[in-house]
Image (cartoon, rainbow, N blue to C red):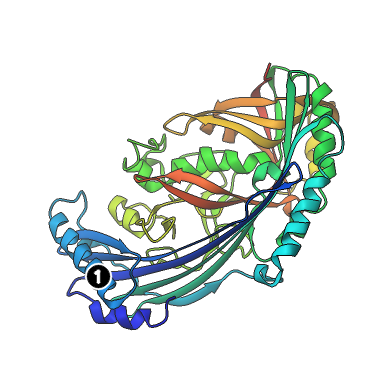
Amino acid sequence: MFEGLEERFRRVLPKADFCSLRAVDERNEIVQVRQNVLQPIQLFQDCGAMITVMDRGGYGYAATSDLSMEGLQRATERALSWAHLAAGQCVFDYTKVAMPHPRGKYESPAKTAWESIPMTAKIDIVKRECERLKTDDLIADFTAVLWYARSESFYLTNEGGSVHQVIRRIYPNLSVTASEGTTSRTRTLGAGALCRQGGFEVLQDVGFMEEGPQLAREALELLSAPNCPEGKMDLLLDPSQLYLQIHESIGHPLELDRILGDERNYAGTSFVQPEYFGSFRYGSDLLNITYDPTIPEEFASFGFDDDGLEAEKLYLIEKGVLKRAMGGLISQTRAGIPGVANARADGWRRPPIDRMANLNLEPGESSLDEMIRSVEKGIYMRSNTSWSIDDSRNKFQFGCEWGRLIENGKLTQVVHSPNYRGISETFWNNLVMVGNRSEFGVLGTPNCGKGEPNQVMRVGHATPPALFRDVDVFGGD
């Protein structure tokens, strides 16, 4: 698909301060079985390129699915025209940006290539795991699904930049719903967040072929479990819930384009202000948040972002203090605030914007047992099921599939519909214990939406469990 692409790009280069081509070829395959019935296999491919031009202080871009010489020429002319029309009219002078011209490669590791497994074998595996969810007549709905995406991209610039990346992502999920009378309870595999980069080995790594019967037992147990109690108490969050807490109350507030106001009409603003960086206490000393696209198996790992900036591990929050934003090179230059390599687009049709990639809570020193023993009155919650957060990503409310009370240092009663609420700064400053490296969970989400027009992005999160004091907890009845 990309044969001869670089040569064609070099031949259509305009006279401009900067020009880049970002070509993407993505192929998806989805195998799903619901209630032991194979659903239609989904196979789809999407291929095209975006030409970006910066000239005379303006910025323009144009996308095309025609990768011929003529197609690239037309896209380049449109991008250059838009850049000249925008010159002097933008909120920012793009001559101030020193765009990189990187050279390099990145490829997701894969012990067992997805393509090496016959389709019949994949279908058999998904069928088997779906069947194993139906353990009782009270199981009303049950689904197993495998989603594989392979994305190959080339990034080329007018001064010799050339980056080739191949990213393989697997998104396995199990879901089981038990129902009795008017009551239904659902359990999923890691809240549907156990998605990673890699090959077929990911299924074993995340428990896809082991956890089904246990999920069914927990769904049945929730049918007779009491409602979650209400009140202030300690809250122990499993990685299957904490990943989304990080995503919503740290990730989105730290996106620099949101802080600059670019997203206010659609995705909202941020309670974080530009002057907070370097001094604002976001959380307790145990809060260490890194931006790390270098973990091979994490969902949003890569070598270079979509503006060519090389990825590296950097602390956003260190010992509770806010250090840097999640802003790509253009936003960093606009704001004068340190950022990271996170200018990303969800495909060839869209321009890069500031997006989360791998946003992680660094491990602490506590085991899960130690955290439980430290609690006199509290609750342990797993697997997100609902979330709500205000436009500035400050006040929030989350619900989980499964909860278990902690009384006098021991896990006791399972409860259904556990929920909690809080305010971001207060919540993270009440962080009192963080799980160690052995408790570290690698998760992600395939469907984070942002931008106008909307872009649906894949995001990674890795985190151990963590304990918070004095959280407002309530039930769902």
Rendered location of residue 84, percent (x, y): 14, 61
Q: Of residues 328 and 105, which is closer to you in this image?
A: 105
Q: Residue at x 48, y 51 (%)?
A: 457
Q: Which residue is mark 1?
A: 18
Rendered location of residue 418, percent (x, y): 70, 26
Label 1, residues with CA under 10 Å away: few <14, some 14-19, many ≥20 = many
Q: Residue at x 64, y 33 (%)?
A: 385
Q: Quadrant of the N terminus?
A: bottom left
Rendered location of residue 205, percent (x, y): 75, 58
Residue 405 left/right relative to 252: right
Quadrant in which residue 392 is drawn: top left
**What number of labels is visible?**
1
Rendered location of residue 9, percent (x, y): 30, 77
Quadrant in which residue 148 is drawn: bottom right
Residue 283 lies, with reference to residue 154, above or below; the image says: above
Residue 330 lies, with reference to residue 394, above or below; the image says: below
Q: Residue at x 48, y 31 (%)?
A: 394
- Secondary element under disc 1, as helix, strand or loop, is strand
Residue 265 lies, with reference to residue 287, above or below; the image says: above
Quadrant in which residue 403 is drawn: top right
- Whether residue 274 is visible here, answered yes or no, is no
Residue 271 left/right relative to 142: left
Q: Residue at x 77, y 58 (%)?
A: 124
Residue 416 lies, with reference to residue 383, above or below; the image says: above
Residue 130 left/right relative to 108: right
What amino acid is at disc 1? Phe
- Whether residue 403 is visible here, answered yes or no, is yes
